[in-house]
Amino acid sequence: MKTKDITILLVDDEPDILEIIGYNLTAEGYQVVTADNGAKAVKMAKKKTPDLIILDVMMPEMDGIEACEQIRKIPSLENTLITFLTARGEDYSQVAGFDAGADDYITKPIKPKVLLSKVKALLRRLKSDEAEENIVKIGDLTINRDEYKILNGKSEIVLPRKEFELLSLLASQPGKVFKREDILNKVWGNEVVVGGRTIDVHIRKLREKIGDDKFKTVKGVGYKFVL
């Protein structure tokens, strides 16, 4: 999908934010529409069916959390990606955002280049949702799901099965925060005697083998793989 075919709905009650972020997204080639509160965002989302919504949390009339909840109830928008704009330290907003159905969050203030890279990472999920590939290449990392093989550059990394499946899950959608309960369900399924600490131990081992900077903990929510 080319950038000119992608529509992004940008929602913020600060005119400067709309102007600066909107300008950079438009300059990158995206189709950008805007709204300055949550109520308008819901109406605009119904009208435009955007591929991605960048949604501020604190807004008048209807905040971002409620707007996200309403958008997630609209069948035509079930595949729309939603990321929140949150101020630093708003852990509660981040957790509430994921509970409302958000896919990710972006912390303000943010540099335009960093914002664009995050947007690109988010939009890659649209491709990931279309078809799951058996061989995934992310930077220098190659994951071969058929052969349970990991290559970092030309060096092979041997992982136990659960570590491999956890890495494969997180790396399938870089930047997406996977909730702890979703990780347990998808990697361990109905296996007994598995708790939250099991995930932490496996993440620690993956950090040692793949790189500490590749895995980010989202407090109170879960983990994500970062490029």
Image: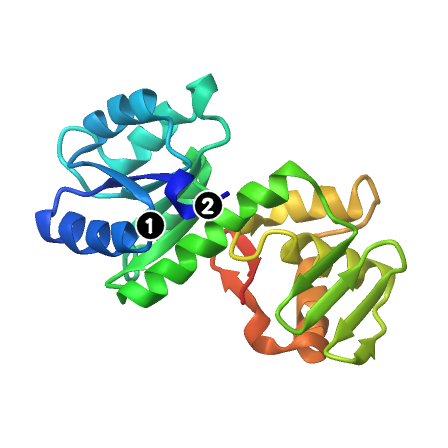
Residue 131's place in the image compared with 167, above or below, is above
Q: As drawn, which residue projects farthest toward the right?
A: 147
Q: Residue at x 28, y 25 (%)?
A: 42
Q: Residue 175: x and y, percent?
A: 51, 56
**The C terminus: image quadrant:** bottom right
Q: Residue at x 41, y 58 (%)?
A: 118
Q: Secondary structure at mark 2?
A: loop
Q: Residue at x 43, y 40 (%)?
A: 102
Residue 95's place in the image compared with 147, above or below, is above
Q: Secondary structure at mark 1?
A: loop
> Which of 35 and 225 lies nearest the eye of the viewer?
35
Q: Is residue 1 left or right of residue 142?
A: left
Q: Residue at x 26, y 43 (%)?
A: 57
Amino acid of disc 1 = Gly
Q: Kindly indicate whether the residue at mark 1 contacts the one at mark 2 (C-beta within 8 angstroms).
A: yes
Residue 197's place in the image compared with 6, above or below, is below
Which numbered circle lies on residue 2? 2
Residue bearing the label numbered 1: 29
Question: Looking at the rendering, which quadrant does residue 212 occupy?
Answer: bottom right
Whether residue 96 is visible: no
Categorize mark 2 by other alpha carbons within 10 Å: few (<14), some (14-19), many (20+): few
Q: Residue 10: x and y, percent?
A: 26, 42
